[in-house]
Amino acid sequence: MLVPRGIRSMVASSAGEAVDILAGSRIHMALVDIDSQVVNGLSIVRAVRGYEPMLPCIMASAQCERPMLSRALALDVFSVIAKPVDTVILQRQLNRLFIKKYNSYVFSE
C-alpha cells in the first residue's frame, strides 16, 4: 500500500528510536501499534509529541474501549483503528489524514 505510492516506511521499536528517526528524517505521519509487546505504544506517541507536537498519529489497538480511546484523545491522535487492521480502513484513514494535513491525494482510491 505504501511503496506503490512512493511512501517510505521506517520502524521504531522504542521511543528513543522514534525520536532518532524524527531527528534524522522528514516524517509525515506515525502509525503506532499500541499493543506492542516490545514497548508501550503510548510512550512512543508521547515521545513523538514531545519532539514533533503536530505530527499526525494513527494508533492501532486490539482494545478500542473508552479508557484507551480517552488516552488517545488526550494525546491528540488523528484516529484509532481496531486490530486486526483492515487495509481498506487504514487506506481511508491515511487518505483523510493526507488530504487534511497536506492537501495531498496520494492515498485516494
Image: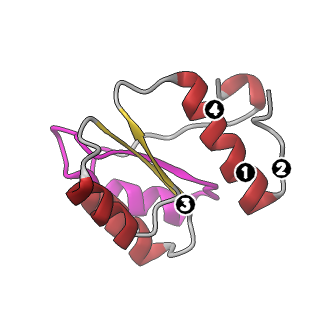
Residue 24, disc: 3
Q: What amino acid type should be assigned to the residue bearing mark 1?
A: Phe
Q: Which residues are magenta?
A: 13-41
On screen, residue 8 above or below 17: above
**Are the two marked residues, 1 and 2, in contact with CB atoms closer than 8 angstroms?**
yes
In three-dimensional space, the C-alpha distance between marks 4 and 2, rounded to whole angstroms, equals 13 Å
Upstream in sequence: badge 2 or badge 3: 3
**Are the two marked residues, 2 and 3, in contact with CB atoms closer than 8 angstroms?**
no
In three-dimensional space, the C-alpha distance between marks 1 and 2, rounded to whole angstroms, equals 5 Å
Give the residue drawn at x 59%, y 57%.
25
Give the residue drawn at x 45%, y 69%.
76
On screen, residue 86 above or below 76: above
Upstream in sequence: badge 1 or badge 2: 1
Q: What amino acid type should be assigned to the residue bearing mark 2?
A: Ser
Q: Looking at the picture, how far across and down is residue 62, in whole percent? A: 26, 35
Q: Looking at the picture, how far across and down is residue 66, in whole percent? A: 25, 56
Upstream in sequence: badge 3 or badge 4: 3
Q: What amino acid type should be assigned to the residue bearing mark 3?
A: Gly
Check disc 1 and report the residue beneath it.
98
Q: Looking at the picture, how far across and down is residue 82, in whole percent? A: 37, 35
Q: Nearer the viewer, mark 3 or mark 4?
A: 4
Check disc 4 and report the residue beneath it.
91
In three-dimensional space, the C-alpha distance between marks 1 and 4, rounded to whole angstroms, equals 10 Å
Q: Is 4 included in the stretch rendered in magenta?
A: no
The answer to whether residue 105 of the structure is visible from this angle is yes
Mark 1: secondary structure:
helix
Check disc 2 and report the residue beneath it.
104
Category of crowding for the residue at label 4, using alpha-carbon neighbours closer than 10 angstroms: few (below 14), some (14–19), many (at least 20): some
Quadrant of the rendering where the N terminus is positioned: top right
Residue 90, by quadrant, is top right
In three-dimensional space, the C-alpha distance between marks 2 and 3, rounded to whole angstroms, equals 23 Å
Q: Residue furthest left?
A: 37
